[in-house]
Image: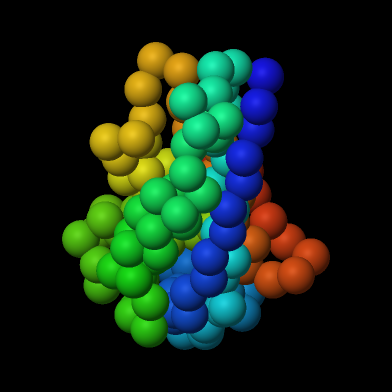
Amino acid sequence: MFEIKVSAEFEAAHRVAGYPGKCDRLHGHSWVVEASVIGSKLDNLGMLVDFKLVKGRLRELLETLDHRMLNELPAFENINPTAENIAQYVYNEMKKAEFFNDNAKLKYIQVWESPKSSVIYTED
């Protein structure tokens, strides 16, 4: 089994409505997002999936979140844009990429809201 990982970053503000503390107030993070792809078969070049394709899709997706107030985006209209919900959103959007197939699968999305705090989302 092979596993490749790529990461990208975005800057965004949010608030966790109803949180009993500071996070209920508007604040921002330098978010880091990692995508993990797994599979057992390599293509004729010896690659599972080209890093460039995975990183390109991740960057394209994160561009829609960059320098935004996450609470105002349609994806978070009815839920708080917590690290957990961001990870699930990115996972669900990433898995739509055309380079995923019967072999190359999205394993997880990991989102860091700070250097010491992260969440991993996977369907398993």
Q: Nearer the viewer, residue 55 or 14?
A: 55
Classify residue 29 as left or right of residue 77. right
Q: Position of residue 101 (x, y in %)?
A: 36, 22
Q: How many marks?
A: 0
Q: Nearer the viewer, residue 35 or 86?
A: 35
Q: Looking at the image, which residue sits at the far right? A: 116
Colour convention: rainbow
Q: Position of residue 58 (x, y in %)?
A: 42, 56
* Above-or-below relation of 76 to 53: below
Q: Quadrant of residue 79?
A: bottom left
Q: Looking at the image, which residue sits at the far left? A: 74
Is residue 11 in sight in this rendering? yes
Q: Nearer the viewer, residue 41 or 73?
A: 41
Residue at 40% in and 50% down = 53
Q: Nearer the viewer, residue 11 or 45?
A: 45
Q: Position of residue 43 (x, y in %)?
A: 48, 25
Residue at 67% in and 19% down = 1
Classify residue 93 as left or right of residue 117. left
Q: Looking at the image, which residue sits at the far front? A: 44
Is residue 88 in sight in this rendering? no
Please identify the quadrant where the C terminus is shown.
top right
Residue at 75% in and 70% down = 115
Residue at 51% in and 33% down = 45
